[in-house]
Image (tube, coloured by chain):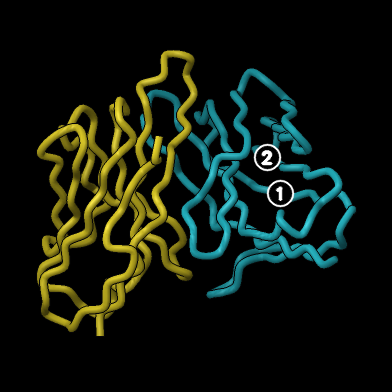
Chain colours: A yellow, B cyan
Amino acid sequence: DAGVIQSPRHEVTEMGQEVTLRCKPISGHDYLFWYRQTMMRGLELLIYFNNNVPIDDSGMPEDRFSAKMPNASFSTLKIQPSEPRDSAVYFCASSPLDRRATYEQYFGPGTRLTVT
Amino acid sequence: GESVGLHLPTLSVQEGDNSIINCAYSNSASDYFIWYKQESGKGPQFIIDIRSNMDKRQGQRVTVLLNKTVKHLSLQIAATQPGDSAVYFCAERKRGYSTLTFGKGTMLLVSP
């Protein structure tokens, strides 16, 4: 398995532009998570999906952020309009529905976003 | 150490030493704990996990200890190698939830 795939790996954009981050979870995983990582705030959960349905988006910082999961193999995180304070590394992670009660999440390589 | 501002607590060890990384968790309702390793430029990678009905679990060169009385978790790495240099995160899962809450992380630096 290729693991969780994220694109692009790096994104540099100007303030006010729309940014779309993409994620392909591991096949067969039921959960998908979007995180943001900064030095100041660490790893923050933004939103997560179960079977393509958004379950908790309370971590999404503002209405400028939106996430979709149109099917089991694809999710997007969109920022419109982007601001310099959105600069961070964004991770996607997926997790299987594990009846053995382990909750390991498998992380992608991340997208480093820089908004100038 | 405590995390202050932009600085991660850092543990510096010599190659071959044993390393102990500590983590305090906050929620007594947490029933599952996990350690991740994050190398520079990469996503976090699973190391080892433990459920709250256990006190200790061992893996290859790693041991996780759980002290529920004081809500403390530790990761022990035996015979630390330069390749172990990374940031290590603990995470907890609150009973009934599907999400993990991550700690701030500890940087481990291993010198040859």
Left/right placement of residue A87 relative to residue A3 reads left
Q: Say which mark, if any, is on residue B73.
A: 2
Q: Are marks 2 and 1 on the same chain?
A: yes
SS category of the residue bearing label 2: strand
Subunit that carries the residue with mark 1: B
Residue in view at x 48 percent, y 14 percent: A100
Q: Check disc 2 and give the amino acid type.
A: Leu
Residue in view at x 46 percent, y 61 percent: A42
Picture quarter with the C terminus of chain A: bottom left
Residue B59, percent from left and from top: 72, 30
Q: Check disc 1 and give the amino acid type.
A: Asn
Left/right placement of residue B76 relative to residue B103 reads right
Nearer the observer, A1 or A49: A1
Q: Which residue is mark 1?
A: B22
Pointer 2 and pointer 1: residues touching (CB < 8 Å)? yes
Residue B85, percent from left and from top: 70, 60
Subunit that carries the residue with mark 2: B
